[in-house]
Amino acid sequence: MEGLTLRFGELVAVDALDCRVADGAMFGLLGANGAGKTSTIKMLTTLLPPSEGTARVAGYDIVHDAAEVRRHIGYVPQMLSADGALTGYENLLLSARLYRVGRDVRVPRIAEALSFMGLTDSAHRLVKTYSGGMIRRLELAQAMLHRPSVLFLDEPTIGLDPVARHSVWERLVELNRGHRMTILLTTHDMEEADHLCTDIAILHAGRIAVRGEPAQLKASISEHATLDEVFAHYSAVSESGRLRDTAETRQVARRLG
Ligand SMILES: Nc1ncnc2c1ncn2[C@@H]1O[C@H](COP(=O)(O)OP(=O)(O)O)[C@@H](O)[C@H]1O
Ligand SMILES: [Mg+2]
């Protein structure tokens, strides 16, 4: 990211981010509600054009090579995206077409993604009968069909119970280390960030307040600090406002739960 900026009228949601993430990283973008995490992801996934600055994803410029960027990324949005009125298999077939997965490899790729996410036995059930954890795993399956080199996950485990959360974690680690996908995820769950991320940036009001490996960040506070303490220290959570963001988060949590 180079000077990556997003404005909504007067509001600067993302404020001139300069940031380089290594190939193969599991990068955590943290920050209080409204810090600018989703806005950053929307620019990196080419859903919103930056107001200023640019970024390269998988080697392609998000402004000038948006189509190439889309071909090389997978995205699981904060809001649920799977269609509840279709089966898991039908959702995957739709994604395979959208991502232009070749006709000849569609069926084996879908079977592989279902098996990887532990959904083979539920493939032909309607998604509205799935648990929150199954829906998130289906969305991950949808995002991996075309073998993206970079995966964007916006609050992938929000609203999930501990067992479902751990099963999502296991898959993410395997995608990152086994399938060599670079992953950028956002989360409010510091245990999750500590467990998964090799590299973390804490956003505050659209800027990077601090950046480093989890161990470095904790050591910067005190010898026995937790990531929760790091987060509180750098994100300076404000008590005011944020009604919209809180309402949005609760809505996702309710639909997943
Ligand atoms: N479509 C929008 N129109 C106006 N303001 C927005 C819009 N989307 C986000 N914002 C504002 O931009 C800021 C960053 O939001 P967002 O990127 O969603 O934060 P986060 O994902 O970290 O919670 C917040 O102040 C939010 O209210
Ligand atoms: Mg968000």
Image (cartoon, rainbow, N blue to C red):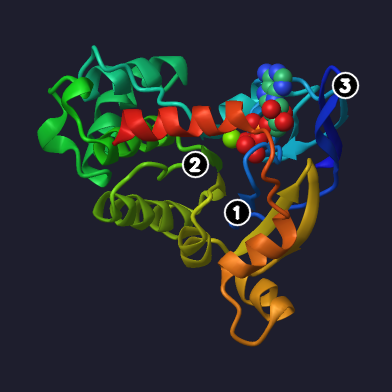
Q: Circle 1 sits on which residue?
A: 28
Please rate how many residues cluster around mark 2, counting C-alpha atoms within 10 Å: few if below 14, some from 14 to 19, many from 20: many
> How many marks overall?
3
Q: Is residue 206 left or right of residue 3?
A: left
> In the image, residue 239 lies at what x, y percent?
67, 45
Residue 45 visible from this viewpoint: yes
Q: Which mark is residue 85?
A: none
Q: Residue furthest left?
A: 121
x and y percentages locating residue 67 in the rendered image: 66, 20
Identify which residue is drawn at 65% across, 61% down.
Answer: 232
Residue at 70% x, 41% y: name it: 35
Residue annotated with mark 3: 10
Which quarter of the figure is the N terminus placed in? top right
In what element is the residue under mark 1?
A: strand
Percent x, y for residue 136?
34, 37
Tell me which numbered mark, 3 or 1, is placed earlier along the sequence. 3
Quarter of the image that includes the C terminus: top left
Q: Between residue 163 and residue 184, name the one nearer to us.
A: 163
Q: Are marks 3 and 2 in contact (CB under 8 Å)?
A: no
For the residue marked with disc 3, what is the amino acid?
A: Glu
Q: Is residue 124 above or below residue 162?
A: above
